[in-house]
């Protein structure tokens, strides 16, 4: 089940390295952005959004390249999502099911989560930390594409938002929080998917 995981990690890493050969601005800024995105999408809240907002604002002042910012943010988020998913897949259920306080409640929550992911897994990816999908054994054939699409939506929403809106976007994303940020990203992703579906449907018709 994990066969595609390493190959996806390699492809994302190669893409990020290629971008670093064609960028404007300090390489350390891009490395910081990629590291923050990896951390956030692996399950650590906060650093990815802060790094991407900062990078978008710097790009708006021509100190970084916005295209490179978006690609690095996407690559970091995708890689972080994969790492979080693998951690949840390998160790998540053992941690949740370990003997200790509230074991029965934790097992009940795990069972309900399994049923939820079985039915709404693709949607849940956009609203839960990456390791949660691993805990509930979401297949790589479903998770990896959804993770990559979610990373695209996040990079575009936060990155382009900070690039065009400047520092004011910080207040917006502080107000809506992480869930709101993901909702904005999801709306963009849904719009793209619906547009593509309509195009395919019209061609078939």
Image (cartoon, helix red, strand yellow):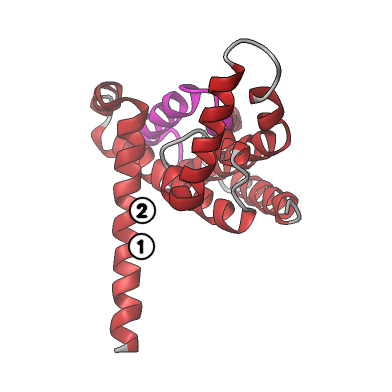
Is the residue 122 above or below the residue 169 in the image?
below
Tell me the SS state at disc 1: helix
- Residue 184 or 32: which is nearer the viewer? 184
**As displayed, is residue 47 above or below residue 143?**
above
Does the magenta stretch mainly form a helix, a strand or a loop? helix
Which residue is rendered at x = 53% and y = 21% of the image? 105
x and y, in percent, of residue 122 in the image: 46, 51
Q: Residue furthest top?
A: 101
Q: Please tell me whether residue 91 belongs to the stretch shown in magenta.
A: no
Residue at horizontal 27 percent and vertical 29 percent from the top: 169
In the rendered image, is residue 126 in sight? yes
- Taking the spot 53% from the left edge, 29% from the top edge, the residue there is 108
Q: Is residue 15 above or below residue 133?
A: below
Q: Dot 1, crowdedness within 10 Å: few (<14), some or many (≥20)? A: few
CA gap between label 2 and label 1 equals: 6 Å
Assign a secondary structure to mark 2. Answer: helix
Q: Position of residue 148 (x, y in %)?
A: 52, 51
Please report contact status of discs 2 and 1: CB closer than 8 Å, yes or no: yes
Residue 189, disc: 2
Residue 162 located left or right of residue 132 = left
Give the extent of the magenta segment.
Answer: 39-66
Residue shown at the point (34%, 46%) measured from the top left: 186
Taking depth in this image into account, of 167 and 125 the one nearest to the observer is 125
In the rendered image, which residue does mark 1 sit on? 193
Is residue 33 among the parts visible in the rendering?
no
Numbered label attached to residue 46:
none
Q: Residue furthest front?
A: 104
Residue 200 as seen in the image, left or right of residue 40: left
Query: Residue 26 at x, y = what percent?
Result: 56, 30
Confirm whether the magenta stretch covers residue 57: yes
């Amino acid at each position: 089940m994990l066969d595609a995981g390493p190959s996806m990690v390699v492809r994302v890493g190669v893409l990020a390295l290629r971008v670093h050969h064609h960028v404007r601005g300090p390489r350390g800024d891009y490395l910081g952005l990629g590291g923050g995105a990896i951390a956030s999408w692996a399950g650590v809240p906060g650093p990815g959004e802060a790094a991407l907002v900062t990078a978008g604002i710097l790009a708006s002042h021509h100190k970084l390249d916005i295209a490179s910012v978006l690609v690095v943010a996407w690559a970091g988020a995708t890689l972080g999502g994969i790492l979080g998913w693998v951690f949840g897949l390998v160790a998540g259920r053992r941690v949740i099911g370990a003997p200790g306080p509230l074991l029965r409640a934790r097992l009940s929550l795990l069972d309900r989560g399994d049923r939820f992911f079985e039915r709404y897994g693709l949607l849940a990816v956009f609203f839960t930390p990456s390791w949660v999908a691993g805990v509930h054994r979401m297949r790589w054939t479903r998770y990896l594409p959804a993770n990559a699409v979610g990373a695209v939506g996040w990079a575009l929403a936060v990155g382009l938002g900070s690039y065009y809106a400047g520092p004011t976007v910080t207040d917006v994303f502080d107000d809506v929080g992480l869930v709101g940020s993901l909702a904005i990203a999801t709306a963009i992703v849904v719009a793209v998917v619906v547009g593509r579906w309509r195009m395919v449907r019209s061609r078939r018709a």
